[in-house]
Amino acid sequence: MRKPTIIAPSILAADFCRLADELAQVEKAGADWIHVDVMDGHFVPNITIGPDVAKSVNRYTDLPLDVHLMIEQPERYIEAFAEAGATTVGVHVETCPHLHRTLAQIRETGARTCVVLNPSSPATLVEPVLGDLDQILVMTVNPGFGGQKFIESMLPKIETLRQWIDDAGLDVTLEVDGGIGPETIGRAASAGADAFVAGTAVFGAPDYAEAIEGLRRGAVSP
């Protein structure tokens, strides 16, 4: 049985000068999670925020924090982000040579475990740890910047992961991030995704509630 659609606005696209107000608005507008993009300028060509900002975000919203660590050596910062309030901690398979150990570290903090796949990374990289996961995040753009175009060739990867999850009878959320908007969310949902990160599609819209509802409609109407 498929899970309800989860919409996770990414604060990467929010106005940081009025972040508390932005958080209140998307929460009121019907968002399910808040997606927090953490970038280090090494693994991806951008620098964003650290645990202190995540802690402030957590203070100003009651929604779960979906923290996405686009950083080298994520194991050094997992505990700090968990203490800051992360509900889910996502790490890139490309940065974790000892992936089982890193996932165990996340679980020890009480956070949900998530593995993230870059567009060039095959689904097979998460197969050995499938039973250790609460969530898989498929990047549908190359990470680092918002506003990029959805990579259509990621749809078969999403389909493969959905099939593995269902065949194993696992309770694993399948999330997508990158280029998600009303015109793309339906294809990602049809491929098997049930959680959707949306940055400019929400924070760039004049009406957040209308934007989120439009994404929900699109997810059930490919």
Image: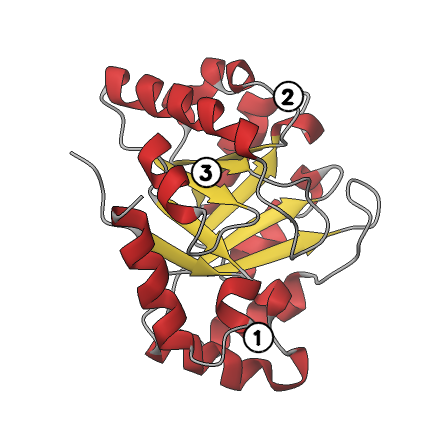
Name the residue that disc number 2 marks. 98
Q: Is residue 108 visible?
A: no
Q: Earlier in the sequence, mark 3 or mark 1?
A: 1
Task: Tell me the residue at 57%/66% (across/down).
Answer: 11
Q: Position of residue 58 (x, y in %)?
A: 49, 70
Task: Tell me the residue at 67%/48% (across/down).
Answer: 77
21 on left or right of 131: right
Name the residue that disc number 3 marks. 113
204 on left or right of 182: right
- The residue at the far left in this view is 1
Q: CA distance from mark 3 to mark 1?
A: 22 Å
| Three-letter code for the amino acid on which mark 1 is drawn | Ser
Q: Is residue 199 above or below residue 102?
A: below
| Three-letter code for the amino acid on which mark 3 is drawn | Thr
Give the label on residue 56, or none: 1
Name the quarter where the C terminus is drawn: top left
Q: CA distance from mark 2 to mark 1?
A: 31 Å
Give the label on residue 1, or none: none
Q: Position of residue 168 (x, y in %)?
A: 27, 16
**Closest to the observer: 190 or 18?**
190
163 on left or right of 56: left
**Closest to the observer: 188 or 43?**
188
Q: Is residue 66 visible?
A: yes
